Image (cartoon, helix red, strand yellow):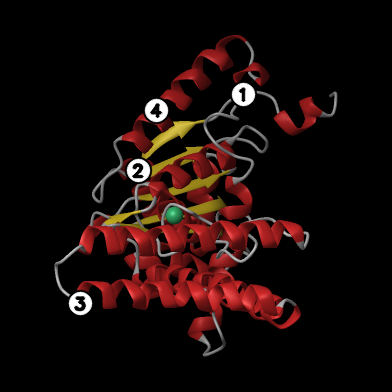
Amino acid sequence: MAYRKEILHKVRQDYNQKRTRALGEAADRLSALHEQYPDLAAIDSALAKTGMNLVQEIVKGSEGINERIAAVRLENERLQKDRADMLVFYGFSPDYTDVKYECTKCQDTGYVETEPCLCYKKALAKEALDYAGLSRLAAKQSFDSFDLKYYQGDNRAMMEKVLASCKRYADGFHAKADSLLFIGNTGLGKTHLSTSIAVEVVNKGHEVVYTSAPNLFSALEAEKFGREASLTMQEVLDAEFLLIDDLGTENPSALNNNFLYNIVNTRLITAKPTLINTNLMPADLMKRYTDRLASRLLGEYAVLRFVGNDIRLQKIGF
Ligand SMILES: [Zn+2]
């Protein structure tokens, strides 16, 4: 796993906070009980003493040590049982004063011995999705929820191949993987499959930047003119995997075309994989973005063509 340090730091901080919170809440419950029930406070101080007693018995020497230690243990067990009975008598569960960790396996440390706990791995993956701007889409769009029933005849056969290619790409993703261009009309699942790939790539521990074209270009414009930007050109160029959703829906401008050329060109030179999806057909790409850029996209990206009838319309009965 190669999560960036902001993600590791954020998750580490969350774990420290929830552990501190769990310990603090348990301490609060205990002191409130001690105040209300002095007999419980007395048992707890007796219990604290049994630890000391154990040390004293050991210090006294080896004669009869096993019996003496057994006696201290017995006393401890009796006190524990009295304590549990007392809690129940006062209307609480016997574990009422225990620390309530979110994860009992790692006690909210994130680690079981030296291994990262499953909960910690999940938290990292989730944070990475948030960081990539993918959590909202990831909840709905995965390979599992991609339904081929909306494609008919030849279209279905083609989309089966597209789906298989996307799965293969996600499975075999690596830092120098090919770049992909999804072309097709609105409502044919381009964003759905883009998200599905990105989520799997994030789950493998790669750093993903996911952005819609309008957001991307307005961020880059903000950066260029010294305003606060949600994304910088450096981040876009450095991302292990860059996903630009809906290219062509941004405002057309020479500046945006320059940004795009810089992104496509630099990432091809540095062999960093990029996924772009667009409603623009090849001829439209050429018209809109110059032949030079269109030929890089069409010639050096692996192109997947999405076909069929608008799924969103089919879903509402058209
Ligand atoms: Zn855990």
CA separation, marks 1 and 4? 15 Å
**Amino acid carrying mark 3 in the image:** Lys
The residue tagged 3 is 60
Q: Quadrant of residue 96?
A: bottom right
Badge nearest the viewer, 2 or 3: 3
Report the mark closest to the observer, 3 or 1. 3
Q: How many marks?
A: 4
CB of mark 2 within 8 Å of CB of mark 4? no
Q: Nearer the viewer, mark 2 or mark 4?
A: 4
* Residue lying at 58% horizontally and 25% vertically, measured from the top left: 307
Coordinates of residue 255 in the picture (x, y in percent): 51, 73
Q: Earlier in the sequence, mark 2 or mark 4?
A: 4
- Left or right: 128, with 135 as reference point: left
Residue at the far top in the pictured view: 153
Q: Regarding mark 4 in the picture, which secondary structure is present there?
A: helix
Task: Residue under label 2, please give it.
Answer: 301
> In the rendered view, would you say 268 is above or below 308?
below
Residue holding disc 4: 165
Give the number of the mark in front: 4 or 3: 3
Circles 1 and 4 in contact, beta carbons < 8 Å:
no
Q: Quadrant of residue 134?
A: bottom right
In front: label 1 or label 4: 1
Does label 1 point to a residue whose CB lies under 8 Å from ligand 1? Answer: no
Q: Residue at x 55, y 65 (%)?
A: 99
Indicate the position of residue 136 as horizontal and vertical percent values. 63, 53
Spatial separation of the CA atoms under disc 2 and disc 4: 14 Å
The C terminus: image quadrant: top right
Residue 29 visible to the viewer: no
